[in-house]
Amino acid sequence: MYLSYADESGGDDANAKDQYFVLGGIAVFERIPFHLSADVDEIQRQVFPGITGPIEFRASAIWSGNGEPWTSMPRTDRMNLMRRIYRLLAQPKGISLFGVALHKSDFPKAIPIQKTSEELAGHFDAYLMGLEIADQNNEKQRGLMIFDKSRHEKTVQGLMTEYRTTGARFGTIKHLAEVPLFSDSKITRMLQLADFIAYAIYRRYESLDAQFFDMLLPKFHQQSGVMHGLMHLDINYRECYCPACLSRRSSMA
């Protein structure tokens, strides 16, 4: 069983000033979360040796120093902590990253969470299909998507049910074992890591700050030279030189 943890970054309502809404995710085999979570726990023990309870690592809070223990932590230390998390995600541990960056003004009629969820589910499903095809034993691959709890829970569950039955824009999703689960990121290190992925993508497209994004770039799912794990939804994709758009154009050349 492969697990895909997903979280969002950027506002998706009509009053949000963000240009982008991002859904980011991490796909791993079922044994990997135990070890990754232990690695994050060890980082906390080293950085905060006096705190025994789990601290929620949220990228935007650490970046801005919003709330304790981040408010009292010098910015240099906060940036070093963020780099440690991103280096952990960049390690070759059977990790595949996914992300969808939606330029909202280019899709005024789209509901951001719906459009990005459809893209993420479709590419996760294709990823599982690729694993299935490559398996010499013809073992069937199944996946489960896990989202952070939010006001979108009913919307996303309904969408995934539809994708597994009547199908999405690209066809029926065939490899998801169940409708997505929702959990509280405060108690799930893997969702905290998904938040870091979404935030890195968000800063790359929203603020043109690629310092964290570049650390993760090799881990986005790729096949035949195309970066299938990273999607930039922008009507000017033919003129865009971000890694996602450039890899797709190069494959068609």
Image (cartoon, rainbow, N blue to C red):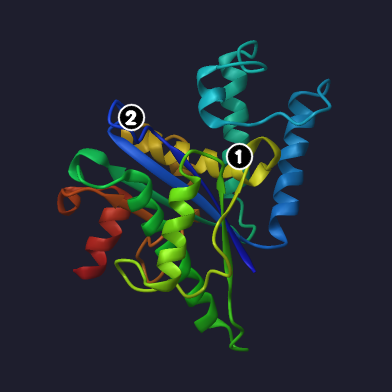
**Disc 2 residue type (three-letter):** Ser
27 left or right of 252 in image:
right
Q: Which residue is mark 2?
A: 207
90 above or below 4?
A: above
The x, y position of residue 17, in whole percent, is 29, 25
Q: Nearer the viewer, residue 217 or 137?
A: 137
State the residue position of label 1. Answer: 192
Residue at 72% across / 46% down in the picture? Answer: 37
Q: Is residue 174 above or below residue 80?
A: below
Q: Which residue is pictured at 36% across the width and 37% down the height?
A: 204
Residue 9 image position (x, y, % from top left):
43, 36
Q: Regarding mark 2 in the picture, which secondary structure is present there?
A: loop
209 sits to left or right of 83: left
Quadrant for residue 209, please give it: top left
* Among numbered discs 1 and 2, the one appearing first in the sequence: 1
Q: Can residue 222 be seen in this snapshot?
A: no
Q: Residues within 10 Å of mark 1 (few under 14, many from 20)?
A: many
Q: Nearer the viewer, residue 248 or 104?
A: 104
Which residue is found at the position 60% from the left and 27% from the top?
80
